Image: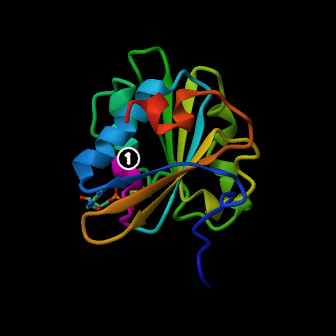
Amino acid sequence: MEIPIVSKPPPFPLLWEYRSASPAQTIRVGRAIGRACRGGEIILLDGPLGAGKTCLANGIARGLNIEGPLISPTYVILRTYASPRGLKLHHLDFYRLSGDDDLASVGLEDCFGEDAVILAEWPGQCPGAFEEFTLALRLEPLDETVRRIRAYAGTVPSASPLTSLKGLGL
Ligand SMILES: Nc1ncnc2c1ncn2[C@@H]1O[C@H](COP(=O)(O)OP(=O)(O)O)[C@@H](O)[C@H]1O
Ligand SMILES: [Mg+2]
């Protein structure tokens, strides 16, 4: 069975696109995203294995002033970090899950809150997990070191700096 790569976008509008030529550049994009987070954001990270989702998540953590690096949550599904900015970062990876029924033991309901930023890798594995989300980021490998990062609007209209490269200072 083919694993669906994308859960909700593309029906949602494309907001911006960035071509990253190295892991360092992907970290830089993530850092800008992390700096722009104010709490309450739900960000979906989509794309095939090795695309750079965890790399981008590491940048976002840095932008939240979390001492890294993040440890991939592939086996534990959820890892939570405290940001000195008074926010929590919940880093989820649904790669090993195969449907919404598998969410029961994850404790997802405790992740939502105005003081929390949620990053979810492989959201398409559990399509019912996030009825609302802020932004969906899709990473595509173009060659060994180049990644296309596309940002799609979330379900809630937003004037957040996350919605444009200019707002992010990129
Ligand atoms: N431009 C780039 N951005 C992010 N990662 C890159 C890039 N070029 C090469 N890589 C490599 O791709 C891999 C991405 O791994 P990871 O972030 O764990 O992917 P995922 O979480 O999507 O499975 C790393 O080994 C990283 O060094
Ligand atoms: Mg990963």
Query: Left of 25 or right of it: where is 29?
Result: right
Task: Name the outermost residue toward the bottom.
Answer: 1
Which is more toward the observer, 30 or 101?
A: 30
- Residue behind label 1 places its C-beta within 8 angstroms of ligand 1: yes
User: Can residue 139 be seen here?
Assistant: yes
Q: Residue at x 72, y 59 (%)?
A: 11
| Vertical side of 133 occupied by 84: above or below | above
Which is more toward the observer, 73 or 53?
A: 53
User: Can residue 72 be seen here?
Assistant: no
Q: Residue at x 39, y 25 (%)?
A: 64
Q: What segment carries the magenta color? A: 50-56
Instruction: Please state the horizontal and vertical placement of residue 133, each as a whole percent of the image.
Output: 67, 41
Residue assigned mark 1:
56
Which quadrant would residue 147 be assigned to in this image?
Answer: bottom left
Query: Left of 114 or right of it: where is 122?
Result: left
Instruction: Please state the horizontal and vertical placement of residue 97, each as a whole percent of the image.
Output: 59, 63
Q: Quarter of the image containing the N terminus? A: bottom right
Instruction: Please state the horizontal and vertical placement of residue 22, each as a whole percent of the image.
Output: 24, 55
Query: Left of 109 or right of it: where is 149?
Result: left
- Is label 1 in a helix, a strand or a loop? helix
Q: Residue at x 25, y 70 (%)?
A: 144
Task: Name the outermost residue toward the front.
Answer: 166
Q: Quarter of the image containing the C terminus? A: top left
Q: Residue at x 58, y 20 (%)?
A: 115
